[in-house]
Image: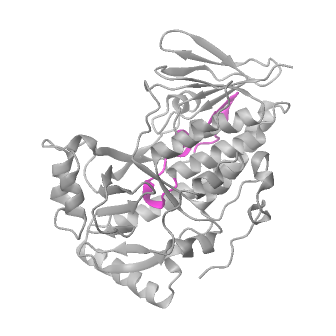
């Protein structure tokens, strides 16, 4: 029998993970990507323990673990003066959640995913495409169709829409849904060469402003920042100048990193999130994954991780011999409650970092400092229920993994 056909719209982290997972399950996969080349949008990504266990399913978890750079070195949360509010280590995080947090350049993760694609997976770049017909898995068994801007039509038994925050597929499937809204802040991201002295991984919280500096395995630094500013703005004199105005008086090495980066290498993006969940993550033969299904703020560091989870769970349900309606209903049942909760928790975390009142920020910092002194593991507890997730099944390459990553694993004891 010939393999069933799957079309993936979008070749970001979620789309490529879906292509790997579906091809491993026996689907004939074609990926359609709007960009002329697979150049990842975004500078860095933190692959959390939950996503590592998802990647185990397709044999990639250990390849990512091998790139771990944050171990026993102290990191944590700081004030703009450089004072530490809370400290932790990578080893403590790994002990609590059963796996480490691995910081990577996004391009590194994309390269690893591409390396797992078999030869019969087709990736077409420079091919903008949109859903033409979501398909009907019922009695008529009508396939889904996708049309490119050039008029080429693809038919498939399954369409996976990984087309991002402003997903055209989502609008086509759920036209009455309000979609994402502005979260109230903007982010900046860039990669930088590390200075001579080792920079500890940290976030720094100010008044309506946040900065993060994270060392990467290749010796570079991933820097990111956020500020509560009106939507749609751009700095007339360049984004480096804007970062210097916002963060130029903060602790070392922030001013030095900003001075060293070229303005054109700074990515600026308004943050949008979907606080109202979709009624389902699928319709017909079409399923939404990643930001297309559940756009969230980056405040819990889970956007890319949840797209990986989506793709792996979809692959686990998508037995080629199974009725596609049953497959997609099971996917929505597994993913909708979890991702809705992660969206809510990300929004709550964002509220902590977007406080602009001086007294409110002082109280926030005092509470964090006091809780950290009284309960040293408290800084990690905010990720309970998120980072300790495991995929519903162990299949494919994960069968050879240790039983420590079995389905239903409870959170290991931690501080």
Is residue 280 a member of the stretch shown in magenta?
Answer: yes
Q: Residue furthest front?
A: 196
Q: Position of residue 195 (x, y in %)?
A: 27, 62
Is 373 placed above or below 130 here?
below
Q: Position of residue 406 (x, y in %)?
A: 78, 61
The residues colored magenta run 278-302
Q: Is residue 142 left or right of residue 52?
A: right
Q: Please state, as top left, top right, bottom left or bottom right, where the C terminus lies in the image.
A: bottom right
Q: Position of residue 327 (x, y in %)?
A: 77, 37
Q: Quadrant of residue 73?
A: bottom left
Is residue 297 a member of the stretch shown in magenta?
Answer: yes
Q: Residue furthest left?
A: 237
Q: Is residue 183 left or right of residue 375?
A: left
Which residue is at a point 48% across and 51% down the rendered structure image?
Answer: 296
Q: Position of residue 123 (x, y in %)?
A: 57, 25
Which residue is at a point 76% across and 53% down the rendered structure image?
Answer: 392
């Amino acid at each position: 029998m010939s393999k069933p056909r799957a079309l993936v719209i979008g070749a970001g982290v979620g789309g490529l993970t879906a292509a790997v997972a579906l091809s491993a399950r026996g689907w004939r996969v074609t990926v359609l990507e709007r960009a002329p080349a697979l150049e990842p949008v975004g500078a860095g990504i933190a692959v959390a323990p939950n996503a590592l266990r998802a990647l185990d399913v397709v044999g990639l978890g250990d390849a990512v673990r091998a790139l771990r750079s944050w171990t026993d070195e102290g990191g944590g949360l700081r004030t703009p003066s450089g004072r530490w509010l809370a400290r932790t280590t990578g080893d403590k995080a790994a002990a609590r959640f059963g796996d480490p947090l691995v910081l990577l350049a996004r391009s590194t993760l994309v390269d690893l995913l591409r390396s797992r694609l078999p030869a019969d997976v087709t990736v077409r770049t420079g091919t903008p495409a949109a859903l033409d017909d979501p398909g009907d898995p019922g009695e008529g068994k009508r396939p889904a169709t996708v049309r490119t801007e050039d008029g080429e039509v693809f038919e498939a038994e399954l369409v996976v829409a990984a087309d991002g925050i402003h997903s055209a597929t989502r609008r086509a499937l759920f036209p009455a849904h309000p979609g994402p809204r502005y979260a109230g802040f903007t982010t900046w991201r860039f990669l930088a060469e590390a200075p001579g002295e080792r920079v500890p991984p940290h976030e720094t919280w100010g008044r309506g402003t946040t900065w993060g500096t994270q060392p990467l395995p290749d010796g570079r630094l991933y820097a990111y920042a956020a500020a509560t500013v009106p939507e749609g703005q751009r700095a007339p004199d360049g984004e480096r100048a804007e970062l210097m105005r916002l963060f130029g008086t903060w602790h070392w090495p922030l001013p030095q990193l900003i001075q060293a980066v070229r303005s054109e290498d700074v990515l600026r993006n308004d943050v949008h999130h979907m606080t109202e969940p979709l009624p389902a993550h699928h319709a017909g033969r079409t399923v939404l994954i990643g930001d297309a299904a559940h756009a969230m703020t980056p405040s819990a560091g889970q956007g890319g991780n949840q797209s990986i989870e989506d793709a792996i769970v979809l692959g686990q349900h998508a037995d080629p011999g199974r009725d596609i309606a049953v497959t997609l209903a099971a996917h929505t049942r597994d993913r909708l409650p979890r991702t809705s909760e992660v969206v809510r928790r990300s929004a709550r975390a964002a509220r902590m970092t977007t406080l602009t009142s001086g007294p409110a920020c002082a109280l926030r910092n005092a509470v964090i400092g006091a809780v950290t002194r009284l309960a040293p593991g408290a800084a990690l507890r905010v990720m309970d229920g998120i980072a300790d997730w495991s995929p519903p099944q162990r299949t494919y390459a994960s069968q050879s993994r240790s039983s420590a990553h079995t389905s239903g694993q409870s959170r290991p004891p931690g501080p």
